[in-house]
Amino acid sequence: MEILQDTEQNATETESSVEEKNIKPIYRGEWATQLNNGDLLPVGGSLFSDELTLKMELDFDKFDNELLTLAPESVKKKFERNRESIESSLEAIDSDLDPYLFFLCYAMQQTAFKLLEVQEEDTDYFSRQIDFSNKRTKKLSDTKGNAACAEIAALGQYLLQRAGLKSTYVGGITMRDPKDTSEYPEPHSFLLIDNPNNNGTLIFDISRPFSNKSPRILKTEVPLTYELLEGKQDLLVRGDDIFGGTSLWYGVGKPVAGGHKTISDERINN
C-alpha cells in the first residue's frame, strides 16, 4: 500500500510539474505552450489585483466525439480539395503565408466557433466575470453559447494540436493604438504560431475573425516570445494583418488608459 501511495504521489507531482512547465505566468496573464485535458487555466480576476483568481477547467474530452475527423491525414485531404482556391486568394494579396497554415487556421477557427456555439454578439465582459466568480472554477464545456476569447483560444490551440500544428496560447492585452492616452487596453487571449518563412511569429487572433469569417492572422514586427515578455509589466508588439491595412498591438500591461510602452520604445531606451 505504501508503494502504491508513493507511486500515486509521484504521478501527481509529475503531472503538476508538467502543467507548470507548459503554463507559465506573465504579467496579468499566462503563456501556455501546450494545454491538456484537465488543466486549470487562469482566465481572469479583479481589475484591482494582478493575480488571476478565476480559473477554467479544460475538459477537452467533452468535445472529442465531435473531433474524429481532425487527424492530420484527414485535414490534409480536405486541404488538397481546396488548395487551388486558397493559393489563388493568397497570391491575390501578394502574401507569402503558407497556404496549408492559412487553411488550418480557417478550419480550426470554424470548428471552435461551432463547438462553443459562439454568438455573433460580443460576450459581455462584466457578466462573464460575475459568472466565473460565482463558481471560481468553470469548465470549458459550460461556456457554450457564452464563450469569450480565452475559451475560444484555448480550444483553438487544442484543435490545432490535434491537426498537427503547434501553437502557443497567450493571455495578455491588445490595443489599437498604444499611444492613444484615452484608449483602455482590452484583456485578450490569442494564439502564437511560428512563421516558417522568416523565423518570426504570427498572431492568430482566433476569436476575432473578419466579417467574411477569414481568420485574422498578423505578422509580428519582432518575434513575440516568452523571454520578451517575462518580467515585463508593460510591453506591446505590433502585428500587421496579412491582408494589409490593419495593425494591432499585443502583449502585457495594466488595464488603464494613458499610453503604453511598445517594443520600439524599448529599443530607443536601450
Image: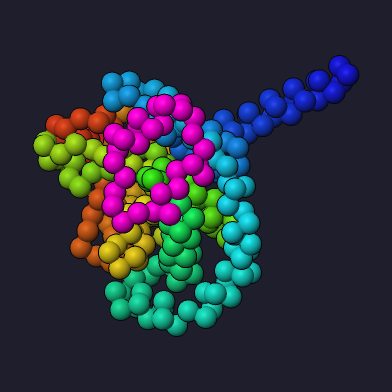
Which stretch did the figure color magenta? 117-145
Q: Position of residue 117 (x, y in %)?
A: 43, 54
Q: Nearer the viewer, residue 270 or 209?
A: 209
The relative height of residue 31 versus residue 14 in the rendered view (above or below) is: below
Residue at (25%, 50%) from the top-left corner?
248
Residue at (11%, 37%) from the top-left corner?
182
The relative height of residue 194 versus residue 262 in the rendered view (above or below) is: below
180 sits left or right of 6 in the view: left
Q: Nearer the viewer, residue 119 or 69?
A: 119
Q: Position of residue 95 (x, y in %)?
A: 34, 71
Tell whether position 142 is magenta. yes
Residue 177 visible? The answer is yes
Residue at (41%, 76%) from the top-left corner?
86
Q: Nearer the viewer, residue 146 or 92?
A: 146
Tell whether position 197 is magenta. no
Q: Quadrant of residue 4?
A: top right
Residue 250 visible? The answer is no
The image quadrant where one finds the N terminus is: top right
Q: Position of residue 218 (x, y in %)?
A: 33, 57
The relative height of residue 77 versus residue 197 in the rendered view (above or below) is: below
The image quadrant where one finds the C terminus is: top left
Q: Nearer the viewer, residue 235 or 164?
A: 164
Residue at (45%, 48%) from the top-left corner?
144
